[in-house]
Image: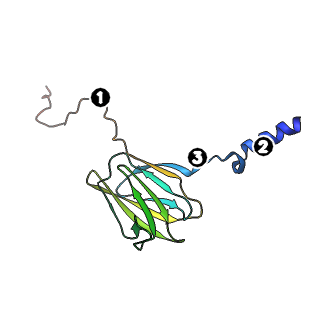
Amino acid sequence: MKAVLLLLSLVATDPLFGQDLSYRVRAEVLDQRNPITVNVSTHAVTTLQFPAPIQALESDGFTQKPNEEAGDFYISPGLNWVSIRSLRPGAVQNLGVVIGGRVYEVMIQTAEVNDLAVLFRFERPPRRQTNIAPRAWSPLNSTPSS
């Protein structure tokens, strides 16, 4: 009986049997100056989720009709998400995602192990210190010394 319990505990903690896929879901910060690389595959779909509605998707090599149009990647866009699958091994292409009038670049590359999902968020603005009143020093504002 102890051997069976030991075997079951090993199977439950083994990544091949336990199927912990959380490492294949990532959270990333959108930054116009720092493109994010996303791994997609030819056998599974990767979904990118954005924190606001997408205004436009800009790139070559993406198609919604892979049987009618040439393309390296199949793309299925939604309001604030995009699902992508590679149509051929070794394909690499950048995708410009326009949100709020700003473009964020995502480098899409074909890999053997794909990201299941990439959850994007905006960087939070730095917090202002509320206990310090903003005041600029000026010789006109200083009190005369006696």
Mark 3 vs mark 2: which is more N-terminal? 2
**Residue 22's disc number:** 3
Q: Amino acid at mark 2?
A: Leu
Q: Is residue 5 left or right of residue 76?
A: right
Residue, disc 1: 130
Foreground residue, 70 or 145?
70
Foreground residue, 71 or 105?
71
Q: Amino acid at mark 3?
A: Ser
**Would you place residue 20 above or below residue 140 in this image?**
below
Mark 1 vs mark 3: which is more N-terminal? 3
Q: Tag 2's secondary structure?
A: helix
Q: Going 15% across and 37% down the picture, which residue do you hit?
A: 138
Mark 1 vs mark 2: which is more N-terminal? 2
**Where is residue 65 drawn, in percent x and y?**
41, 67
Mark 1 to mark 2: distance in Å? 53 Å
Q: Quadrant of the N terminus?
A: top right
Q: Residue furthest bottom?
A: 70
